[in-house]
Amino acid sequence: MAIKTTETSANVTDFINAFADSEQKRLDSFELLKLMSNFTGFEPKMWGPTMIGFGSYHYKSERSRQEGDWPLVGFSPRKAAISLYVYTGNPEHEYLLKDLGKFTMGKACIYIKKLSDINIDALKLIMGETIKFLQAKYGKS
């Protein structure tokens, strides 16, 4: 079974301008776009209708027959919060969250209200460890 969220050719800038529901979220989204592009070295791509991803890897689930491609890191400016897809959820990486700042955890993401609520250096550390972990586990694509 393949995952439904896949890379698309939609324009990232157009998406942010249309989807971010406040000026603060729009500005934070463009700042995250610049930060993640510069940090990862990957161009931003739309994944599905609402996620912006950087880089990708191909995975096969160990628990199910699901496999597919997924961004190494990414984000989405959702209505309630900005979703950051930057954390593996691996228990060995929990220590990385201690200096991040004000956030809540979802099942597969970190929610922030605004970018100024978090420590950017801690975010970079989390992204770096996540990318290393995913590329070691699944290989570089």
Image (cartoon, rainbow, N blue to C red):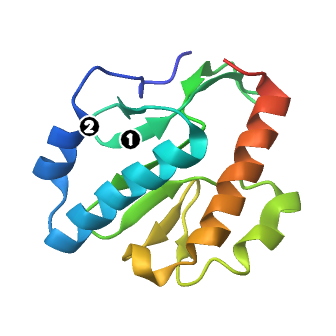
Spatial separation of the CA atoms under disc 2 and disc 1:
7 Å
Q: Is residue 121 left or right of residue 46?
A: right
Give the SS element for disc 2.
Answer: helix
Instruction: Tell which of 44 and 71 is nearer to you.
Output: 44
Q: Residues within 10 Å of mark 2 (few under 14, many from 20)?
A: many
Q: Which residue is mark 2?
A: 12
Quarter of the figure that contains the N terminus: top right
> Mark 1 belongs to which amino acid?
Ile
Considering every residue shown, the one lying at the far left of the view is 18
Q: Residue 120's image quarter?
A: bottom right
Q: Residues within 10 Å of mark 1 (few under 14, many from 20)?
A: many
* Residue drawn at the location 72% of the way across and 27% of the way down: 61
Quarter of the figure that contains the C terminus: top right
Q: Residue 71's image quarter?
A: top right
Considering every residue shown, the one lying at the far right of the view is 92
* Residue drawn at the location 53% of the way across and 75% of the way down: 104
Q: Is residue 109 above or below residue 28?
A: above
Residue 43 visible at all? yes
Could you tell me residue 69's position as x and y percent?
56, 22
Q: Is residue 95 left or right of residue 13?
A: right
> Mark 2 belongs to which amino acid?
Val
Specify the label residue 52 is tagged with: 1
* Residue drawn at the location 63% of the way across and 21% of the way down: 66
* Residue drawn at the location 21% of the way across and 49% of the way down: 16
Could you tell me residue 55's position as x and y percent?
55, 30
Q: Is residue 64 left or right of residue 70?
A: right
Give the SS element for disc 1.
Answer: strand
Circles 2 and 1, Cβ within 8 Å, touching? The answer is: yes
Could you tell me residue 112's position as x and y percent?
44, 73
Residue 62 visible at all? no
